[in-house]
Amino acid sequence: MAMRSAVVVGGGIGGLATAAGLVRAGWDVRVLEQAPELSAVGAGISLWPNAFRALEVIGAADRLSAERLPEPGGVRDWRGRWLARLAGDAAVGDTSANAVVAHRAELLDALLAGVPDACRMTGTRVRGVRRDGTHPVVEYTTEGGEPGELAAELVVGADGVRSAVRTSVFAEAAPPRYARRTAWRLVLPMPCPVSGESWGPGSVFGMFPMQGERIYCYATATVPAGGRSADGELAELRRRFAGWHDPIPALLAAATPEAVLRNDLYELPPLRTYVRDGVALVGDAAHAMTPHLGQGGCQALEDAATLVRLVGATGDLEAALRRYDALRRPRTQALARRSHLVGEVVQAHSPLAAAARNLVVRLTPRSMFVRSLRGVFDWQPPADTDQTDRVIS
């Protein structure tokens, strides 16, 4: 039997996870990445139980070395007053014990280990995808400017929020929209004194422990798109969070400018389908969402695991792709809506709205918080014979 073929466009989390899973399933795979090398850009990433089930399907779970999260401290306001203390709750502890905060580079290494060098084509800019007879064809330009093309049974668009695959194959797709927020991320080489989030008017600051006595910190703020601080992003963070509770100012005082990354946050308007003519979208190319549920990377891994499991279980690729769309689109689009709504509440800007938000959080039972996340974390990959999935409403 001839080896089945796939071209994966994009060497990020979703692309490498899909590639590793397809290689493991015996496919001939090529990964096209615009950057000159496959390396992670970013800081930490939260991986919850659903992500680890996906990594098991892909074959990468055992290659990721990371410490499980301790019990999260909870949520405080910007002055340090507790809104929701989660430590000590058995259900919360069970969930966090099966989650980690890993560095994106460490996750990327675990995925890359399943993608042989011969499969990797870096320095390759994809121009688009066209249909040629029965197969999709990826058109690209090399780093040296030479044009090229690759045909395959399956093309996977994993090229992010500004996906060239989505633009060329799904011409009706609306462009990404700015979520009215920017995010800063950094990793500090020191033990984490307490984990959790702090909320202020229009801003959030989070801190979580990472393996090797490191802290993953992130912050978001409601600001216009495209902004940059004239004296650097670390100086901007120190100004914005100068009056916040300890240890936030001390953490920022210990940071170095080169450790801080800033990225505007974008969402993708819902697509009517994630598949067309032998092409499937995964990750941000399909459903870019805000980070307020910590599920962007997890959903990309779920996409990859679902696609790999379905196309590997049948010779009918078209049917498998239809099933992939039926399973993944409702769930990811529902999570994107929920993440957007959570962001609107968490980032309440006016003092009155922030005070109302804080009151509601203080009065909400912890059990309700846990139940609200159960449908997210309880996801299971489709079985070979019973291809089911959980939809979040």
Image (cartoon, rainbow, N blue to C red):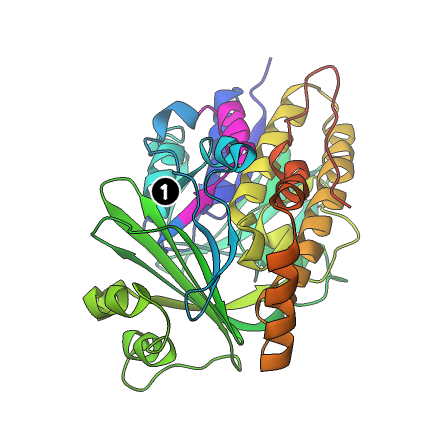
Judge from the rendering whether residue 210 lies leftward or rightward of residue 161; answer left or right: left
Decide: is 267 above or below 299: below
Magenta residues?
A: 45-60
Residue 254 on image: x %, y %: 19, 65
Is residue 128 among what the camera can see? Answer: no
Residue 261 on image: x %, y %: 35, 65
Judge from the rendering whether residue 373 lies leftward or rightward of residue 222; answer left or right: right
Disc 1 marks a residue whose amino acid type is Ala
**Secondary element at image label 1:** strand
Judge from the rendering whether residue 254 lies leftward or rightward of residue 22; answer left or right: left
Is residue 245 among what the camera can see? Answer: yes
- The reply to whether the magenta stretch includes residue 53 is yes
Residue 62 on image: x %, y %: 38, 23
- Quadrant where the image shows the N terminus: top right
The image quarter in which residue 256 lies: bottom left
The residue at the far bottom in this view is 230
* Residue at x 63%, y 24% (from the top left corner): 309
- Depth check, front residue: 270 or 347: 347
Task: Count all numbered tags in the image, as a single digit.
Answer: 1
